[in-house]
Amino acid sequence: MTRPPGIILAGGLSRRMGENKAAVRLGGKAMIRHVAERLAPQVSSLAVNAPEGADAGLGLPLVPDTIAGHPGPLAGVLAGLRHAQKLARPPRHIVTAPADTPFLPRDLVERLEAALPTADAIVVASSAGRGHPVVALWPLALADDLENWLANPENRRLQAFIARHPSASVDFAPIETRQGPLDPFFNVNTPDDLALAKALLEEEDG
Protein backbone atom coordinates (compact mmCIF):
# COMPACT_ATOMS: atom_id res chain seq x y z
CA MET A 1 0.00 0.00 0.00
CA THR A 2 1.31 3.45 -0.91
CA ARG A 3 1.87 5.58 2.14
CA PRO A 4 -0.52 8.55 2.51
CA PRO A 5 0.67 12.15 2.72
CA GLY A 6 0.75 13.77 6.14
CA ILE A 7 -0.64 17.15 7.18
CA ILE A 8 0.60 18.81 10.37
CA LEU A 9 -2.18 20.98 11.79
CA ALA A 10 -0.59 24.23 13.00
CA GLY A 11 -3.40 26.70 12.49
CA GLY A 12 -4.55 27.01 16.12
CA LEU A 13 -4.49 30.23 18.11
CA SER A 14 -2.38 28.86 21.04
CA ARG A 15 -4.33 30.90 23.61
CA ARG A 16 -3.27 28.82 26.63
CA MET A 17 0.40 28.83 25.70
CA GLY A 18 0.50 32.58 25.07
CA GLU A 19 2.69 32.13 21.99
CA ASN A 20 2.74 30.05 18.83
CA LYS A 21 2.94 26.47 20.11
CA ALA A 22 4.41 25.14 16.89
CA ALA A 23 7.42 27.45 17.25
CA VAL A 24 8.20 27.04 20.96
CA ARG A 25 11.63 25.57 21.61
CA LEU A 26 11.78 22.00 22.81
CA GLY A 27 15.12 20.25 23.03
CA GLY A 28 16.83 22.95 21.00
CA LYS A 29 14.35 22.99 18.11
CA ALA A 30 10.80 24.09 17.35
CA MET A 31 8.14 21.72 18.63
CA ILE A 32 6.67 21.29 15.15
CA ARG A 33 10.02 19.87 14.03
CA HIS A 34 9.67 17.03 16.55
CA VAL A 35 6.26 16.23 15.07
CA ALA A 36 7.63 16.39 11.52
CA GLU A 37 10.54 14.09 12.39
CA ARG A 38 8.15 11.53 13.91
CA LEU A 39 5.71 11.68 11.01
CA ALA A 40 7.99 12.04 7.96
CA PRO A 41 9.26 8.42 7.87
CA GLN A 42 5.64 7.20 7.95
CA VAL A 43 4.17 9.22 5.07
CA SER A 44 4.79 9.87 1.38
CA SER A 45 5.07 13.64 1.85
CA LEU A 46 4.46 16.30 4.50
CA ALA A 47 2.74 19.69 4.44
CA VAL A 48 1.81 22.16 7.17
CA ASN A 49 -1.66 23.61 7.66
CA ALA A 50 -0.98 27.16 8.85
CA PRO A 51 -1.98 30.70 7.84
CA GLU A 52 -0.45 32.43 4.82
CA GLY A 53 2.91 33.92 5.73
CA ALA A 54 3.53 31.59 8.66
CA ASP A 55 7.11 30.37 8.92
CA ALA A 56 7.20 26.80 10.15
CA GLY A 57 10.95 26.68 9.51
CA LEU A 58 10.67 23.21 7.99
CA GLY A 59 10.90 23.91 4.28
CA LEU A 60 7.57 22.14 3.80
CA PRO A 61 4.60 23.23 1.68
CA LEU A 62 2.23 25.57 3.51
CA VAL A 63 -1.45 24.69 3.22
CA PRO A 64 -3.66 27.53 4.57
CA ASP A 65 -7.29 27.09 5.58
CA THR A 66 -9.71 27.57 2.71
CA ILE A 67 -12.28 29.01 5.15
CA ALA A 68 -11.64 32.34 6.90
CA GLY A 69 -11.97 33.08 10.59
CA HIS A 70 -10.05 30.26 12.32
CA PRO A 71 -12.91 27.75 12.09
CA GLY A 72 -10.94 25.02 13.85
CA PRO A 73 -9.14 21.79 13.03
CA LEU A 74 -11.78 20.52 10.60
CA ALA A 75 -10.83 23.39 8.32
CA GLY A 76 -7.24 22.16 8.49
CA VAL A 77 -8.39 18.68 7.53
CA LEU A 78 -10.28 20.14 4.56
CA ALA A 79 -7.22 22.14 3.50
CA GLY A 80 -5.15 18.97 3.68
CA LEU A 81 -7.66 17.01 1.60
CA ARG A 82 -7.77 19.72 -1.07
CA HIS A 83 -3.97 19.87 -1.11
CA ALA A 84 -3.75 16.09 -1.59
CA GLN A 85 -6.27 16.20 -4.45
CA LYS A 86 -3.82 18.42 -6.38
CA LEU A 87 -0.86 16.05 -6.03
CA ALA A 88 0.43 14.38 -9.19
CA ARG A 89 -0.83 11.04 -7.87
CA PRO A 90 -3.71 11.81 -5.49
CA PRO A 91 -3.83 9.31 -2.62
CA ARG A 92 -6.91 7.68 -1.15
CA HIS A 93 -6.26 9.10 2.32
CA ILE A 94 -4.30 11.68 4.26
CA VAL A 95 -3.03 11.52 7.83
CA THR A 96 -3.35 14.51 10.16
CA ALA A 97 -1.58 15.27 13.43
CA PRO A 98 -1.36 18.50 15.44
CA ALA A 99 1.84 20.50 15.78
CA ASP A 100 1.83 20.15 19.59
CA THR A 101 2.18 16.33 19.89
CA PRO A 102 5.95 15.73 19.98
CA PHE A 103 5.75 12.08 21.11
CA LEU A 104 3.63 10.66 18.29
CA PRO A 105 3.90 6.86 17.89
CA ARG A 106 6.42 5.79 15.28
CA ASP A 107 3.98 3.14 14.02
CA LEU A 108 1.01 5.53 13.91
CA VAL A 109 0.25 5.43 10.19
CA GLU A 110 0.86 1.71 9.81
CA ARG A 111 -1.63 0.91 12.55
CA LEU A 112 -4.26 3.40 11.34
CA GLU A 113 -4.11 1.94 7.84
CA ALA A 114 -4.29 -1.62 9.16
CA ALA A 115 -7.55 -0.77 10.93
CA LEU A 116 -9.37 0.58 7.84
CA PRO A 117 -12.73 -1.25 7.75
CA THR A 118 -13.67 0.20 4.34
CA ALA A 119 -11.93 2.48 1.86
CA ASP A 120 -14.22 5.41 2.73
CA ALA A 121 -13.84 5.18 6.52
CA ILE A 122 -12.13 7.56 8.92
CA VAL A 123 -9.70 5.94 11.36
CA VAL A 124 -9.03 7.82 14.60
CA ALA A 125 -6.22 7.28 17.10
CA SER A 126 -7.16 6.75 20.74
CA SER A 127 -5.44 6.18 24.06
CA ALA A 128 -6.64 5.43 27.58
CA GLY A 129 -10.20 5.15 26.29
CA ARG A 130 -10.19 8.64 24.74
CA GLY A 131 -10.29 9.43 21.03
CA HIS A 132 -7.93 11.94 19.43
CA PRO A 133 -9.81 12.97 16.29
CA VAL A 134 -7.09 15.39 15.15
CA VAL A 135 -4.81 12.34 14.81
CA ALA A 136 -6.58 10.41 12.08
CA LEU A 137 -6.64 8.89 8.63
CA TRP A 138 -9.10 10.74 6.35
CA PRO A 139 -10.39 9.56 2.93
CA LEU A 140 -10.14 12.09 0.12
CA ALA A 141 -13.65 11.08 -0.90
CA LEU A 142 -15.00 13.10 2.06
CA ALA A 143 -13.66 16.46 0.89
CA ASP A 144 -16.85 17.76 -0.73
CA ASP A 145 -19.04 16.64 2.17
CA LEU A 146 -16.68 18.29 4.66
CA GLU A 147 -16.68 21.55 2.69
CA ASN A 148 -20.49 21.56 2.63
CA TRP A 149 -20.58 20.73 6.35
CA LEU A 150 -18.27 23.61 7.24
CA ALA A 151 -20.37 26.07 5.22
CA ASN A 152 -22.66 26.10 8.25
CA PRO A 153 -20.89 28.03 11.07
CA GLU A 154 -22.61 25.77 13.61
CA ASN A 155 -20.68 22.76 12.27
CA ARG A 156 -17.22 22.85 13.80
CA ARG A 157 -16.98 19.74 16.01
CA LEU A 158 -14.71 16.98 14.76
CA GLN A 159 -16.67 14.22 16.50
CA ALA A 160 -19.95 15.38 14.99
CA PHE A 161 -18.54 15.21 11.48
CA ILE A 162 -16.89 11.83 12.06
CA ALA A 163 -20.23 10.45 13.32
CA ARG A 164 -21.70 11.10 9.84
CA HIS A 165 -19.36 8.54 8.26
CA PRO A 166 -18.04 5.01 8.74
CA SER A 167 -15.18 5.09 11.22
CA ALA A 168 -12.88 2.99 13.36
CA SER A 169 -10.42 3.70 16.15
CA VAL A 170 -7.02 2.32 17.09
CA ASP A 171 -5.91 2.31 20.72
CA PHE A 172 -2.28 3.09 21.51
CA ALA A 173 -0.74 2.07 24.83
CA PRO A 174 0.90 4.61 27.14
CA ILE A 175 4.66 5.06 27.04
CA GLU A 176 6.41 4.14 30.29
CA THR A 177 8.67 6.94 31.55
CA ARG A 178 10.33 7.92 34.82
CA GLN A 179 7.64 10.60 35.09
CA GLY A 180 4.95 7.89 34.92
CA PRO A 181 2.84 6.61 32.00
CA LEU A 182 2.81 9.07 29.10
CA ASP A 183 -0.08 9.41 26.66
CA PRO A 184 1.59 9.11 23.22
CA PHE A 185 -0.75 11.90 22.08
CA PHE A 186 0.18 14.20 24.97
CA ASN A 187 -0.26 17.69 23.59
CA VAL A 188 1.65 20.70 24.85
CA ASN A 189 -0.92 23.40 25.60
CA THR A 190 0.55 25.34 28.55
CA PRO A 191 3.95 26.37 29.93
CA ASP A 192 3.62 23.56 32.50
CA ASP A 193 3.03 21.06 29.69
CA LEU A 194 6.13 22.41 27.94
CA ALA A 195 8.24 21.91 31.08
CA LEU A 196 7.04 18.29 31.30
CA ALA A 197 7.74 17.72 27.61
CA LYS A 198 11.29 19.00 28.06
CA ALA A 199 11.85 16.61 30.98
CA LEU A 200 10.45 13.70 28.97
CA LEU A 201 12.60 14.56 25.96
CA GLU A 202 15.72 14.70 28.11
CA GLU A 203 14.85 11.26 29.48
CA GLU A 204 14.26 9.92 25.96
CA ASP A 205 17.55 11.35 24.69
CA GLY A 206 19.39 10.08 27.75
Image (cartoon, grey):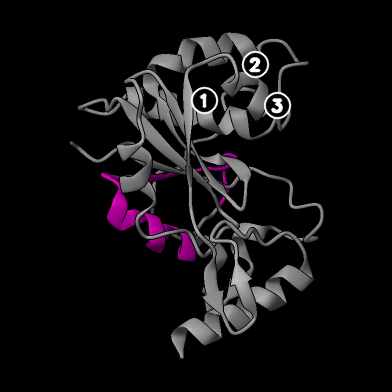
How packed is label 2: few (under 14 Cα within 10 Å), some, or many (20 or more)? Answer: many
Kindly report the distance in space between the C-alpha atoms of the residues bearing marks 1 and 3: 13 Å
Q: Secondary structure at mark 3?
A: loop
Which is more toward the observer, 29 or 105? 105
Q: Position of residue 77 (x, y in %)?
A: 52, 31
Q: Where on the picture, by quarter, is residue 41?
A: bottom left
Q: Label 3 sits on what residue type?
A: Arg
Magenta stretch containing residue 34, yes or no? yes
How packed is label 3: few (under 14 Cα within 10 Å), some, or many (20 or more)? Answer: some
In the image, residue 58 above or below residue 24: above
Mark 2 or 1 closer to N-term?
1
The residue where tag 1 is placed is 78
Q: Position of residue 164 (x, y in %)?
A: 58, 14
Residue that appears at 59% across and 43% down:
132
Q: Secondary structure at mark 1?
A: helix
Q: Where on the picture, by quarter, is residue 154?
A: top right
Q: Label 2 sits on what residue type?
A: Leu
Q: Secondary structure at mark 2?
A: helix
**Residue 150: numbered disc:** 2
Which is more toward the observer, 50 or 176? 176
Mark 3 or 2 closer to N-term?
2
Q: Position of residue 13 (x, y in %)?
A: 74, 46
Q: Which residues are magenta?
A: 33-54
The residue where tag 3 is placed is 157
**Residue 52: numbered disc:** none
Residue that appears at 38% across and 41% down:
112
Q: In the rendered image, is residue 27 in sight?
A: no
Magenta stretch containing residue 165, yes or no? no
- State the count of labels: 3
Disc 2 to disc 1: CB gap under 8 Å: yes
